[in-house]
Amino acid sequence: MAVTTAQRPASRAYILNPTSSRLVWTGHAEAGGYAPSGTLRLAPGGTLVVTSSGTLQTAQVLVDTRTLSSANDKLQEHLRGADFFDVPHFPTACFELLRVTDGQAQGRLTLKGQTHPLTMPIRVTPLGSDSLLLQGTAQVDRTQFGINYNSSSFFQNLGSYAIRNDFQVAFTLKAGRQ
């Protein structure tokens, strides 16, 4: 009697590099073309696991919300405050990857202490034998996380003060072998 076992592809662990990674956020007014943007930085400790065939298997991406920046100082201060991301109480956001299917990363985003599913397109590119580049854009509905400030879904007659519920975070993440 012969017994065969399926072999799992060998996995490789990587650590995300906060210094060489880039995150750019963009918000939008509901009316007109106002679309402020700025940057965020990764917090240390993010990890990835990739199979030997190059498939992204798991990931934990930590974002330091204290680094949220905007060219407009007043806007930056407001976004860091309780109306939006409440950075003093929630200094880190986390995306936990569950799977990648057909170029779509499926996982859970924890923001302001609340966790919700998030799916986004992702591209994984090897950079030599010891590093990777991950690129994509996440579309986040802020109201799922209790960020309701000037949302016409919650407040009436906002006029030009209404802010769209969704914002985007475009990311280019670099990771090196552990």
Image (spheres, grey):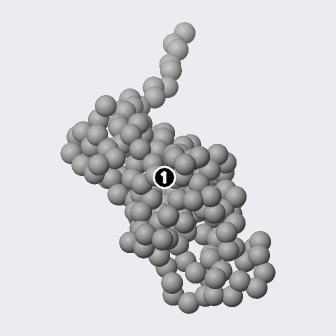
Residue nearest the observer in this picture, 108 or 85: 85
Q: Is residue 123 left or right of residue 145?
A: left
Residue nearest the observer in this picture, 24 or 100: 24
Mark 1 lies on residue: 65
**Res. 51 in view:** no
**Image: 81 above or below 15:** below
Q: Position of residue 143 (x, y in %)?
A: 68, 63
User: In the image, what residue occupies the spot 38% across and 29% down?
Assistant: 10
- Which three-letter amino acid code belongs to the residue tagged 1? Thr
Q: Position of residue 178 (x, y in %)?
A: 31, 31
Query: For the N terminus, which image quadrant?
Result: top right
**Res. 86 in view:** yes
User: In the image, what residue occupies the spot 37% across and 33% down?
Assistant: 13
- Which residue is outermost to the left? 128
User: In the image, what residue occupies the spot 51% across and 87% down?
Assistant: 33
**Image: 10 above or below 175:** above
